[in-house]
């Protein structure tokens, strides 16, 4: 479960700036995991619980807030990053157990996590489009080995 949480957090940090074809300085991105799979049967059963997870990312030029609701509310995370102060606070509520992790934003990703992120495969399906807030958007699929 810790690896899944770490993967989601890493994905949020890496892909947060990638929103559209032009620069957007503030806004909200909402997404849901609708399909997730693995070739490993043990991992696949754990990933099945991730279906239906909801992510909300609120951002401005100087800070962002990510809200994550997983497993039907059994696990919730709030991640606040203040770029000006280089501060990242992660609040977690996992089945009633509450945690606060405070760190420097630039120290929160390890070399191992950066390597794992570099191996992710991103596929764009430009035939599957949708207009969102006046922007033509297309489907993106992320695959992690």
Image (tube, rainbow, N blue to C red):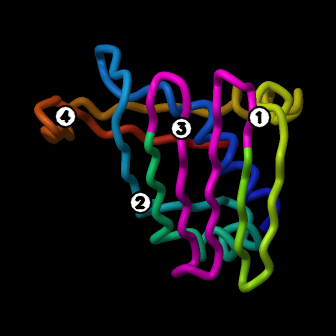
Q: Does residue 120 sit above or below 46 in this rendering?
A: above
Q: Nearer the viewer, mark 4 or mark 3?
A: 3
Single out the mark in the foreground, 1 or 4. 1
Question: What secondary structure is found at the residue carrying circle 1?
Answer: helix
Write down the residue under mark 3.
Answer: 64
Alpha carbon separation for disc pair 4 and 3: 31 Å
* Mark pair 2, 1: CA separation: 22 Å
Kindly report the distance in space between the C-alpha atoms of the residues bearing marks 3 and 1.
Answer: 23 Å
Residue at x 13% of width, y 38% of height: 131
Depth check, mark 3 against mark 1: the one in front is 3
Which residues make up the magenta segment? 59-88
N-terminal label among 3 and 1:
3
> Where does label 4 land, which residue?
127
Quadrant of residue 11 within the rendered picture: top right
Q: Is residue 71 magenta?
A: yes
Residue nearest the viewer, comparing 51 with 17: 17
Q: Which mark is residue 77?
A: none
Magenta: main secondary structure = strand
In this picture, residue 116 sits left or right of residue 70: right
Q: Residue at x 15, y 38 (%)?
A: 133
Image coordinates for residue 20, horizontal then vertical, percent: 32, 24
The quadrant of the picture occupied by the N terminus is bottom right
Q: Are marks 2 and 4 in contact (CB under 8 Å)?
A: no
Q: Say whether disc 2 or disc 4 marks the residue closer to the N-terminus.
A: 2
Label 2 SS = strand
Q: Earlier in the sequence, mark 1 or mark 4?
A: 1
Does residue 133 lie above or below 38 as drawn?
Answer: above
To which quarter of the image does residue 97 belong?
bottom right
Q: Residue at x 72, y 84 (%)?
A: 95
Count of labels in the image: 4
The reply to whether dot 3 and dot 1 touch (C-beta < 8 Å) is no
């Amino acid at each position: 479960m810790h690896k899944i949480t770490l993967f989601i957090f890493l994905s949020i940090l890496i892909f947060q700036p990638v929103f559209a074809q032009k620069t957007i300085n503030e806004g909200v991105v909402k997404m849901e995991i609708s399909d997730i799979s693995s070739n490993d049967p043990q991992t696949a059963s754990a990933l099945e619980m991730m279906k239906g997870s909801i992510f909300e990312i609120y951002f401005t030029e100087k800070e962002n807030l990510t809200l994550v609701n997983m497993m039907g509310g059994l696990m919730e995370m709030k991640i606040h990053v203040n770029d000006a102060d280089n501060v990242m606070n992660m609040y977690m509520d996992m089945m009633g157990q509450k945690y606060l992790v405070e760190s420097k934003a630039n120290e929160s990703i390890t070399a191992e996590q950066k390597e794992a992120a570099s191996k992710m495969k991103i596929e764009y399906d430009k035939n599957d489009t949708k207009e969102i807030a006046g922007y033509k958007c297309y489907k993106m699929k992320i695959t992690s080995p």
